[in-house]
Image: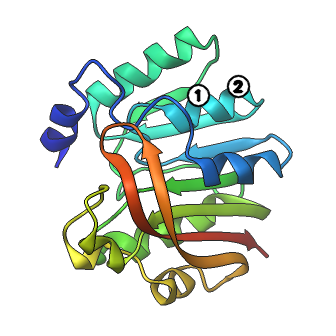
Amino acid sequence: MKNFWNERYSEREYVYGEKPNVFFAEQLQQLAPGKIILPCEGEGRNAVYAAANGWEVHAFDTSIIGKSKAIQLATRKEVSINYTIEDAVTVTYEKNTIDAVAFVYAHFPASIRKKIHQKAITWLKPGGKIIIEAFNPNQLQNNSGGPKDLAMLYTKEMILEDFEELNCDISEIQSVALNEGEFHKGKADIIRFVGTKK
């Protein structure tokens, strides 16, 4: 999988664009800046946006090329981000220290998904937020991106179960028009979730 992402990010262009995900940006605007973790951050568009808005950003991905492009983008935008090469299964952060964790199109196989999601909860301070935008199973009929494996697409029930110990602020299925670079473009079926740690 690491080779897949290195190959995808090897293009000169930012394949998911340089602007942040719309839902992520909307949610961040409602929060006081603090510490945020961005798993599977790729080329850095969301990390750079968060840093430009006063957040202390900790991002990770398995792609060295993704990290390189993220650092270039941060330098160009004159912001600082902490970006490490890590695997979501083994990465560790200090418990109860983080204000938000945002999974933006971070899709995991069923065998590890719940473990990763529940580990993220432990990083949050009480009152901290989990923010998610991901593809739901209806996305299989679209050509606007995402895994072609049904098991890696997220239902509302799946997300609510993974984060059942949080207070649910937003949980919705939507059809939207994506315009996020070359690989997220067109009609998309997505799930959006925000939860708050008790």
The residue lying toward the viewer, choosing from 180 and 114, is 180
What amino acid is labelled 1 in the image? Val
Quarter of the rendering containing residue 20:
top right
Q: Which color scheme did the rendering employ for the protein?
A: rainbow
Q: Residue at x 49, y 28 (%)?
A: 18
Q: Would you say residue 97 is visible in this rendering?
A: no
Contact flag, marks 2 and 1 (Cβ < 8 Å): yes
For residue 156, the mark is none
Task: Compare residues 114 and 31 and report the one nearer the observer.
Answer: 31
Secondary element at image label 1: helix
Residue tagged by mark 2? 52
Residue 48, label in figure: 1
Q: Is residue 146 above or below residue 110?
A: above
Q: Nearer the viewer, residue 21 or 34?
A: 21
Q: Nearer the viewer, residue 185 or 88?
A: 185
Residue 141 in picture, x, y percent from top left: 25, 73
Vertical side of 9 occupied by 195: above or below = below
Mark 2–mark 1 distance (CA, rounded to whole Å): 6 Å
Crowding at mark 1 (Cα within 10 Å: few <14, some 14-19, many 20+): many
Q: Residues within 10 Å of mark 2 (few under 14, many from 20)?
A: some
Horizontal arrangement in the rendering, residue 141 relative to residue 75 (left or right):
left
Residue 160 visible at all? yes
Q: Quadrant of residue 69?
A: top left
- Give the residue displayed 55% in from the left and 46% down from the top: 21
